[in-house]
Image: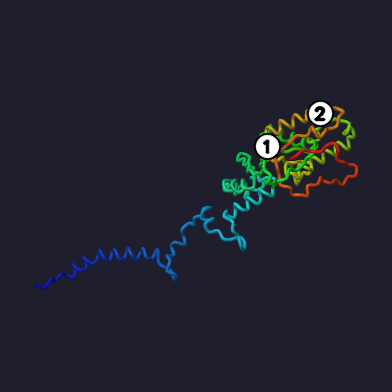
Amino acid sequence: MTNTESPDAQTDSASPSDSGSNSTQAGADTLSPNASGEFAGYDDLPAVARTSSEVDATKVPRYDGDQSAMPDRACWALQNLLTRRYISGDRHPQLWAWVSEYHELLRVRLSELDLRLRLHRELEVAFVEQVGYDSRWGRRLLKRETIHTYDAILALHLAKHVRAARDEHVLITQEEIHELFAGVSNTIDRDVTLFDKRIDHAIDKLEELEILRRQRDDPDTFTVSQAISAIMTASVITDLQQQFEQFIGAGDEPPSPEDDADLDEYRVSDDSDGSADDTDDDDYEEDTDDEGVDW
């Protein structure tokens, strides 16, 4: 028996298939392969940023013979921690981000050198200090920097000023700095001109330590770095305050080496040859009785 169907029936049965074919063709038009065999539609997808772990996984040697186990950014953060007095979020935002991200790795590497990482997240300040213990084999990698009595007095007042202001940016003028020394009086500084030069020298020293930053548009105005709140701990401020009061109470007596405070809490890398700063003014001489403090 021969099975025959009407033309209409054949047309009706073909319609669903044709419809599906058309749908498939429409999709093919949207994601049609290009010459390389990839769908052109993928080019319009948003790019996804790679995570730090993905970047680290693709680490390539920085130089021939590079055997470092840490990511490049951690290595650069470590190098800057060892060569800068401190890293702050406002002045070194990229370095601060790397220190924050890799702080656990950095602590391990620094510990191997008897160094401790101080990380103050609230102030966005990080610096390294030397750890001391009894061993004839241990070596000090960071040298303490000596500051003199007037430098310490200025640092004390600036630290108290910043803590009291509770402001992100603290400004102080050169005239206001001189006024901080209004209570200082002894036989050495009865010469007003020499007294002012000592204060200016202290200002220069704290500029060198990156505690004071001179304003470009107003050279007589300084920004006080928030880092001083991290560096000048409460115990340091208390010790300096006691020494300052003894200095004031000495009256006609010059400051003695025994009056100097020990600032072991803040150790910095020695960027210079360790010699005292020279001055161009022949009339200015450092007080030979003032041996300075370890900063």
Give the label, 2 or 1, closer to the camera.
2
88 relative to 284 in the view: left or right: left
Helix, strand or loop at label 1? It is: helix
What's the residue at 78%, 49% (across, down)?
Answer: 273
Dividing the picture into quadrants, the one containing residue 256 is top right
Q: Which amino acid type corresponds to the residue marked 1 in the rendered image?
A: Ser
Residue annotated with mark 1: 229
What's the residue at 56%, 60% (across, down)?
Answer: 60
What's the residue at 79%, 38% (across, down)?
Answer: 292
What's the residue at 57%, 46% (across, down)?
Answer: 104
Task: State whether residue 183 is above or below residue 171.
Answer: above
Q: Which amino acid type corresponds to the residue marked 2 in the rendered image?
A: Ile
How far apart are labels 2 and 1 at the CA level?
24 Å
Residue annotated with mark 2: 248
Label 1, residues with CA under 10 Å away: few <14, some 14-19, many ≥20: some
Q: How is the image coloured?
A: rainbow
Q: Which of 210 and 134 is in front in this view?
A: 134
